Image (cartoon, rainbow, N blue to C red):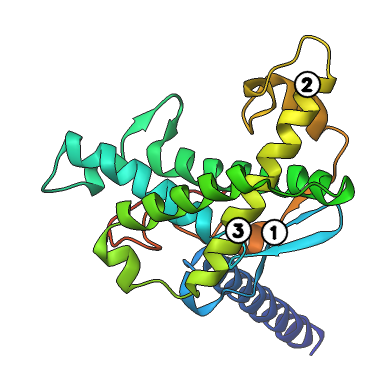
Amino acid sequence: MKSKLWFAVRLILCVGLAAAILAYGVHSLHLREPIDYASNLDLVAVTVDGTDLTLRDLYFYVLYEEKTVESIAEVYDKDQTRLFWNIHTNSSFVQEEAKDNVMGMAVHDWIMYQKAVEEHLVLSSEEKEKLESRRTDFWADLYDVQHDTMPVAYEDVNRTMMQVALAQKAQAKLAQAADGASFAGYNWDGEDYKHELSSHSVQINKKVWNRIIIGNVSLRHDTLITIDK
C-alpha cells in the first residue's frame, strides 16, 4: 500500500515538474518573440535618470539608423540588402550594431537635451533655419517604404529633431567648458561622454528592447537575426 502511495506521489511530482518546465519554456519563447514596433509604441524602451523613453520616442533614431545602414547595404548588394544586415563584423552583427547605435544616440540626446532644458537654452534664428534645412533633407532622404509604414505622426519625429538640435547646443557648451574636451568627444560614442554617462542612470527595458529587430521596423527584411542579450 505504501509503495503504491509513494509511486502516486512521485508521479504527481514528475507531472508537476514537467508542467513547470513546459510553462517556463513557453514563457521564455514568448520573451524571445519579436515585438511589432508599430503596435507597441507606448512600451518603455529605456529609463534615463528616472524618465521613461518609449518606442515612440526612439522612432526618429530608428528611421535615421535604418536609412543609414540600408544605404550602405545597397552598395554591398542592391538586390538583397538583408545580406549586409546579417554580416558578422567587429565581434557582432551589423543589425546588432545598428540597434546599439539607436539606443546609444537616443540616451545621449536625451541627457544633453535635459541639460539644455535646465540651462534654458533656446535655438537662435540661424539655428532654427539650420534645423528646418536638416528636417527637409531628412524627410527627402527616407525611402518610400519608410514614409508608407510610419506609425507615428510627422510632428513626433520633428519634435525629436528639435530636441536633438537643443541637445547639440548643450553638448557644444559642455565641451567648451571642459578643459581639453571637444564636441566630438561628447558625441554618444565619444570618450568624454563616457565619463559624463557614468553619472547618469540608464536602465534598458530588455524585455522590450531585446525583442525589437532594427532593420525590420521602418524597412522590410524577412530574415534578420535576433540575439538575446
**Label 3 secondary element:** helix
Q: Residue furthest bottom?
A: 1
Density class for disc 1 (Cα within 10 Å; few <14, some 14-19, many ≥20) is some
Query: Measuring 71% from the left and 81% from the top, which residue is drawn there?
Result: 7
Q: Quarter of the image holding residue 75?
A: top left
Q: Quarter of the image holding residue 52?
A: bottom right
Measuring from the top left, give residue 83's x and y in whole percent: 23, 43
Task: Check if mark 3's residue and mark 2's residue have beta carbons within 8 Å.
Answer: no
| Camera-nearest residue between 38 and 174 | 174
State the residue position of label 2. Answer: 176
Measuring from the top left, give residue 174's x and y in whole percent: 80, 28
Q: Amino acid under label 2?
A: Gln
Query: Measuring 70% from the left and 43% from the top, which residue is drawn there?
Result: 167
State the residue position of label 1. Answer: 205
> Split into 4 quadrants, where in the image is the N terminus?
bottom right
Which numbered disc flags the more N-terminal residue, 3 or 1?
Answer: 3
Closest to the camera, between mark 3 and mark 2, is: 2
State the residue position of label 3. Answer: 160
**In the image: residue 126, left or right of residue 50:** left
Which numbered disc flags the more N-terminal residue, 3 or 2?
Answer: 3
Query: Measuring 70% from the left and 38% from the top, which residue is drawn there?
Result: 169
Q: Is residue 15 visible?
A: yes
Density class for disc 3 (Cα within 10 Å; few <14, some 14-19, many ≥20) is some
**Label 1 secondary element:** loop
Q: Residue furthest top?
A: 180
Q: Residue 193, relative to residue 214: is it above or below?
A: above
Q: Quarter of the image holding residue 9?
A: bottom right
Measuring from the top left, give residue 38's x and y in whole percent: 47, 74
Q: Residue 192, relative to residue 26: is it above or below?
A: above
Measured Cα–Cα span from mark 1 to mark 2: 34 Å
Closest to the camera, between mark 3 and mark 1, is: 3
| Camera-nearest residue between 24 and 226 | 226
